Image (cartoon, rainbow, N blue to C red):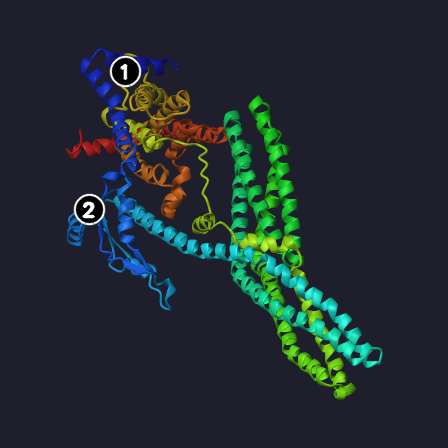
Amino acid sequence: MKNIFRIYKRDMKKLFTNYVAIIIILALSILPSLYAWFNIKASWDPYGSTNGIKVAIVNKDKGYRFNNMELKIGDEMVSELKKNNSIGWVFTNEIDASYGVSHGKYYASIVITEDFSKNLTSFLNKNPKKPELIYSVNEKSNAIAPKITDKGASTLQQTVSENFVKTVNGVIFENFNKIGVEVENQKPNLIKLISIVSDLNNNMENIEILVDKFYNGSLTLDQFIGKIQTNVPVMEETVKSAIEVGNQSKKFIEEGKETIETVSPYIKESLEFARDTAVEASNLIDSILNSTSGNETAKILNTIETLLKATDSKIISIYEKIDKINNLVQNPTLNEVSAQLKDISTGIKSQISTVQELIVASEKGDELAQNTLMKLKNDINQVIEFINEKIDSFDNEFKPALTDVIEKLSTIADNSLKMLNDLNSDMPTITNLLSLADEGATLGSEKLKEFKDALPEIKESLSKVNDKISVLNDDEKINSLIELLKTNPDSAKTFISTPVELVQNSLYKIPNYGSAMSPFYTVLAIWVGTLILSSILTVEVHEFEGERPLKSYEKFFGKYLFFFTIAVTQGLIVAIGDKYLLGCYVVDVKLFIALAALTATVFSMIVYSLVSVLGNVGKALGVILLVLQVAASGGTFPIEVTPPFFQAINPYLPFTYAIGAMREAVAGAVVTNLRRDITKLLLFFIVFLLIGVLLKKPLDKIVEKFNDKFKESGLSE
């Protein structure tokens, strides 16, 4: 042990007694930092400066006159783009755009075709044609720029699509709203129809009694005709009014069918939204179970509460809509689904209360009970399982139930009108019979019998009409149908065009791209620094004069201490510079600096061991490891998008864990992840320490001969 420190002291003494050595070591200490700092600064906020990426816009749209309305969609798109500064839009002609893209003046171009507005309205034709945006991109100019311009083009396409859907649905729902207002105005006539048919049905009994009495000789013919003729005009007026109101009822029921049918996709989309928010809440509970950070736990619990409230709100909206439809015509399936959703809503409210209690406990610093968190997660998963079941069975169970409601309403209208028309067609027969009776009693009992025989059929028809139409004899059901038809067109068209609102929740937010990349570039700089040290500084150790020969492990550790000192200095300089020179965002600065020192220690042991044991071959291996780790560490692109080879070697590279540990310091540490990364780094240190100690002596002579032979070539110093 004494000789190890003597070797280290000798190297340090040589350093501080030679000003050239001091200058070189200072340069070696700072040089790797420049590599990291320049790269971090250059990539500080690349996606915040995309307005410098020029994209040519060519508007050739001639416009189109549609329903006495002049449409110029191209001009509207250009007007909107002029307000958008996310990309450097350049408005020009087709010749300049084509030349500019091919010669690198523009990264891309978007041409709005001449018939864009015309084709946008062709959906009303038998053979609709989609409008086109001609997007041209020069992929040779830059690897990343085309991805940014692609996003701009797709955003433009999405904006046009959303506005189109919003406009079309606006027209539809405005018409539905007008129908709803008309139905509301006709509500007294509808009620009158129901009342008229009911009164007529009740009076038929009295008419039948009168006919029977006369036929049996209880009344004279004059008395019978006088009383019957008093009721016939009422019957004729009643039937005609009933047919008129019935036609109006059939009209608004048929027009309302389409509105009810739009509820089906709304309910399915709402179920999917409720499921997705519940899934996100469940996933966040996992992050609490794996974390011990009190501040982060409170934030996550608040997010879970918000997600559960959103889920409950959507569930309530669904069963309220189902209840309104079901009030028109009762359906067992709709009743069952509504009851289940109400039970689910009650359960979610209980879960929200549990989360609120956990928030209070977390803010007080109390330790959260694991069994409570697990029960909460299980309860949420049951909600998710129920919703998934309803989504899976939606088309087989729920849609047929809605169809049944619609068909029953339509059947009511059809049957009512058929019965009323049949009755109306019988009225001339009744009138003719009475006229004949009034002309003379000579017709006698023969004609009276014909009239008497016809009455049961008339009575039966009228009774059926009364039974069918009485279903609507409920003010609440009529109001429910009117409310569906009178849906606000502005809110409805906005919902249909964008039915899902994305609620983004960033758990570990980093404000800029440069700070997010600082772990990768810092780790890369530290490795580069150790490679430079191994290339410039010697790993050979000279014997002390007049003393016993040094042992191999003494040489190994004695020289390593010098490498370790310079490597840690390099790591500290780059980490401190990241924070205080560049201003990188770092949640835990002390941890970040300590991890830089740990990374430098591990990397210096790896590279030093390779060079000490294998000489120039070790230096080559250090470079090979650098190349592999840049590609396979997941420092830039997610490792999941790289080829299988790089995914396979990723777990066996020190970069993977050094970058992972530094990311924990930059964005906020999850203790389990940080502990895993540090453990892996220490394992690499131990493995290469053993390689150096155990193989140093056996391979010394072989490596020495190899190096001497290489020097003989005159190609090496």
Give the residue drawn at x 48%, y 28%.
Answer: 675
Give the residue drawn at x 64%, y 52%.
Answer: 476
Secondary structure, mark 1, is helix
What amino acid is labelled 1 in the image? Asp
What amino acid is labelled 2 in the image? Tyr
Which residue does the numbered mark 1 point to in the structure image? Answer: 11
Occupied quadrant, residue 558 = top left
Foreground: 688 or 102? 102
Q: In this view of the protein, can residue 532 be seen by the observer?
A: yes
Foreground: 482 or 55? 482
Instruction: Please indicate whether residue 54 sits to the left or right of residue 471 in the image.
Output: left
Could you classify mark 2 by the number of other residues whose Cα lies within 10 Å: few (under 14), some (14-19), or many (20 or more)?
many
* Residue 19 vertical placement versus 36 (above, below): above
* Residue 526 vertical placement versus 375 (above, below): above
Quadrant into which the C terminus falls: top left
Q: Position of residue 196 (x, y in %)?
A: 67, 64
Foreground: 529 or 253? 253
Which residue does the numbered mark 2 point to in the structure image? Answer: 106
Give the label, 2 or 1, closer to the camera.
2
